[in-house]
Amino acid sequence: DAGVIQSPRHEVTEMGQEVTLRCKPISGHDYLFWYRQTMMRGLELLIYFNNNVPIDDSGMPEDRFSAKMPNASFSTLKIQPSEPRDSAVYFCASGGRTNSPLHFGNGTRLTVT
Amino acid sequence: GQQLNQSPQSMFIQEGEDVSMNCTSSSIFNTWLWYKQDPGEGPVLLIALYKAGELTSNGRLTAQFGITRKDSFLNISASIPSDVGIYFCAGQAYSGGGADGLTFGKGTHLIIQP
């Protein structure tokens, strides 16, 4: 089991640029979650999918953020245009069913200058 | 929205000492989870609790799901240097038959002096 795979591990970009973060969940998991972690706010849920369908995106900060899950093995989180306050570590997590724990990837550390 | 209060925020202890941390919530959760995060990595699951009152151990770790469903604690016995890290509690609720995302505490930063 390869676990949840995220790419890239680190991303440094200039303000105004588009950023795309990628996630491959654990095979067979029906749930996929995107979290953002900062020192000030801790871990925040941005959006989650069930069977590739977005269920709750109320945590997405604003319209600059969008997420897609075109198939069961791939999801993207896009920020366009990026701003310095978007700098954080973004985690993807997947879960097998409603009553099972989430498994996290190693995160993408985003720095927007 | 749901919030978790995790305490203490940080702990500095001697190797070999026992550690206790807890989380409380104003809302009921159906599942309580405890994660550990090492620098540069994602949170790793330590213990999962599914029933009110449940007490579960994983090696030197013991966690309990509070009877009211609004709290949980994690104990680490005989701490060792590799226990250093940030420990997060997380609660999971269910609505409409589906799982909501986890709500995380702010974390307890554990520092151990050899």
Image: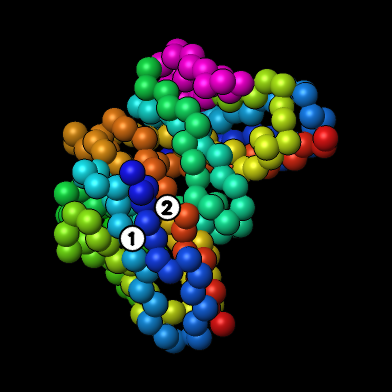
Q: Which residue is located at x 33 percent, y 60 percent?
A: A23
SS class, disc 2: loop
Residue occupied by mark 1 = A23
Magenta stretch: includes residue B69: yes
Colour theme: rainbow
Q: Residue furthest front?
A: A1
Q: Are marks 2 and 1 on the same chain?
A: yes
Q: Is residue A28 above or below residue A59?
A: above
Q: Which residues are magenta?
A: B52-72
Quadrant of residue A46 in the image? bottom left
Magenta stretch: includes residue B68: yes
Q: Is residue A16 above or below residue B94?
A: below
Residue B32 visible to the viewer: yes
Quadrant occupied by the N terminus of chain A:
top left
Quadrant occupied by the C terminus of chain A:
bottom right
Quadrant of residue B96 in the image? top left
Residue B62 drawn at (x, y percent): 56, 19
Tag of residue A105: 2
Q: Is residue A35 above or below residue B102?
A: below
Mark 2 or mark 1: name the one nearer the start of the chain: 1
Amino acid type, callout 1: Cys
Q: Give the tally of numbered discs.
A: 2
Q: Relative to residue A107, is residue A76 drawn left or right?
A: left
Of residue B94 and residue A102, the one placed in the foreground of this image is: A102
